[in-house]
Image: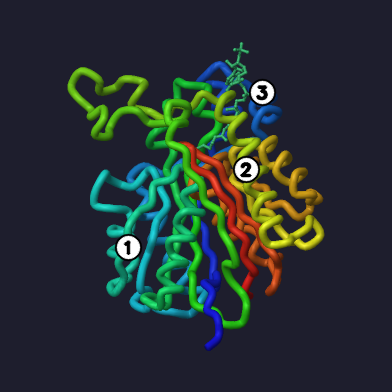
Amino acid sequence: MKNIQAAITAVHGAVPDNILSNADLEKMVDTNDEWIISRTGIKERRIIEKGRTLSDLGADIVAGICEKRGISPEEIDMIVVGTITADHRFPSASNLICHKSGAKNAWGFDVSAACSGFLYTLVTGQQFILSGQCKKVIVIGADIMSSIVNYEDRNTCVIFGDGGGGVLLEPNDEGFGIVDSILKADGSGKEYLLQKLGGSAFPITKENVGSPEAYAFQEGRTVFKFAVTNMADVSAEIMEKNNLTGEDVDWLVPHQANLRIIDATANRMGLTKDKVMINISKYGNTTSGTIPLCLWEWEDKLKKGDNVVIAAFGGGFTWGSIYLKWAY
Ligand code: ACO
């Protein structure tokens, strides 16, 4: 019997049309274009239109994937969603996306892993393909960060944006698909990057509603130190584990949190810049959305058999790396 792998067979992305530029932010908080570009690499980010939600973006992603692959949404077995900004605490974004996209025969759930959301979700989807339970799994990474960002806090509001993407996973017996993954978690990092209010530890009450703690908080300098080391380390680890050199890797798809973190990871892996997918200047940090948005944008350049390494670091802390062989 041939070995089965879970392979990506289609990609689609969705970003809102509204652009929030660095010049716009200069009018909202004490910041400037030069600081934002030199510290992060971000020039602009997208902000969702009023009335549209995460599940609307998700339904667009499913429709785009089905159109590309020439399948009906009813053929989808499962939709797994990496997000920290679902429409509601419950029902899950997956639940609503299945409904809105017409994926009547699908089920699924959300995975909360902040900026590592797409990695955690991709490996989760992979398991349902490998077990044989599902033949077509859509894995989505998307976030509406504008719903949890305080636009009076210059430490966070310049960084984040809205958007996301998704992939279709199908079984492959020709040696293409996900080869290996390393996923890590360390909850002792929670105090440096979190949305404190709104969970069961600190429910929203009459007294605390409107408090800055209702929004995403980040101690940037500390998170930067953890991110820059761990994202580079885990990427080097997956290369060593699979006997890959910088020459062997065709593409690095890094989480887009900060250009300096991406550069450090690429250097550690021995990669030239032309092998690194970078679109942070256009979209900022869309949390779970950054990696599928890169795959979507680079889809035309990816070739069957390309060695692709995906890497991310995010709140929790959570981080990891995935090695896959592109399947089309
Ligand atoms: N405009 C102007 N000045 C600013 C701004 C701003 N928007 N924000 C902060 N500053 C000031 C600070 O107040 C500070 O001033 P001080 O020196 O007088 O105190 C100075 O700039 C330097 O601030 P730092 O926070 O040290 O800036 P740093 O170079 O670390 O950049 C950043 C901040 C971009 C947030 C960086 O730390 C970073 O990228 N951190 C990691 C982000 C990350 O990887 N997050 C994980 C994924 S996100 C997720 O999981 C949801």
Q: Earlier in the sequence, mark 3 or mark 1?
A: 3
User: Disc 2 vs disc 3: which is toward the camera?
Assistant: 2
Q: Which residue is mark 3?
A: 35
The residue under label 2 is which amino acid type?
Met
Q: For numbered disc 1, what is the local secondary structure?
A: strand
User: Disc 3 vs disc 1: which is toward the camera?
Assistant: 1
229 or 45: nearer the eye? 229
Quarter of the displayed picture in which ligand 1 can be seen: top right
Rendered residue at 70%/68% (across/down): 306
The residue under label 1 is which amino acid type?
Gly
Distance in Å between CA atoms under marks 2 and 3: 24 Å
Q: Which residue is mark 2?
A: 231
Q: Residues within 10 Å of mark 1 (few under 14, many from 20)?
A: many
Q: For numbered disc 2, what is the local secondary structure?
A: helix
Distance in Å between CA atoms under marks 3 and 1: 41 Å
Q: For numbered disc 3, what is the local secondary structure?
A: helix
Rendered residue at 56%/16% (across/down): 30
Q: Which residue is mark 1?
A: 108
Rendered residue at 79%/55% (across/down): 246
